Image (cartoon, rainbow, N blue to C red):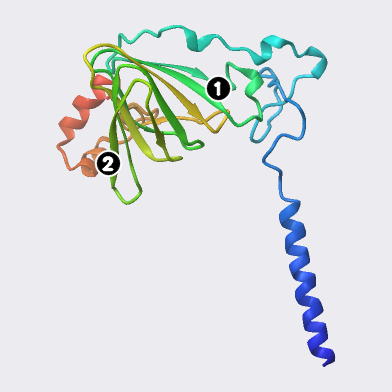
Amino acid sequence: MASLSIARSLFFLILSFAVFLHSCHADPDPLQDFCVADLTAQNISVNGFTCKPPSTVTSNDFFFAGLGKEGDTGNIFGLNVTQGSVLNFPGLNTLGVSMNRVDFAPGGINPPHSHPRATELVHVVEGTLLVGFVTTGNVLFSKVVNAGESFVIPKGLIHFQQNVGEGKALSITAFDSQLPGVLIMPVALFASNPSIPNQVLAKAFQVDDQIVKDIKSKFGSS
């Protein structure tokens, strides 16, 4: 009976310790009202930037007007992304949110890309977009999304948007990260620095080496 009692005591001790550790795990929520990013600080931090001294914080730190202006879509993708992340909106630091404005020329495309640190909510403000993502099981989910409608992209998955309407298109994208990051597949594969060896890409895509060189040349690489 004594050994059974000890076993029960050890079980509840271990259980209590596990609950304690779980409750003491790093809190994902801010532990202060705000932590406006000091983007000039030299010290290294994790999951955020160093806070500005509260005495130097102003109302402008919580204000960003960058999403109100149409971007230049005169490029190979017919696209302009105006980012509203902590890098240009310091008040977002530690708050876990950010937004982008995405302008599309007629036929413009936001090429296949991923955000390693965030789920994305696409809200179409103007025009019509084809929006889709591919799962880790290589299943495509896509939908034609009109003005006033939304589509969600799970965190980290490869996705795209293309303007399939007759005129310009505009979307606002929201993220559950202050700095979602972006990996644009064609740029990452064909314009990395240093360059991915041609034979690697040729083998991966099952094409001739010359095709890889031709694609790289369009991105200013070789």
Q: Mark 1 points at which residue?
A: 85
Coordinates of residue 91 in the picture (x, y in percent): 66, 20
| Mark 2, residue position | 200
Image quadrant holding the C terminus, namely: top left
- Among the 4 quarters of the image, the one containing residue 65: top right
In the picture shown, does residue 28 fall above or below 68?
Answer: below
Crowding at label 1, few (<14), some or many (≥20) Cα neighbours within 10 Å? Answer: many
Left or right? Give the position of 32 relative to 139. right
Viewer-side label of 1, 2:
1
Would you say 9 lies left or right of 89 here? right
Q: Where is residue 54 in the image (x, y as percent from the top left)?
A: 80, 18
Disc 1 is placed on an element classified as loop
Which amino acid type corresponds to the residue marked 2 in the rendered image? Val
- Mark 1–mark 2 Cα distance, whole angstroms, equals 34 Å
Q: Residue furthest front?
A: 148
Q: Nearer the viewer, residue 144 or 28?
A: 144
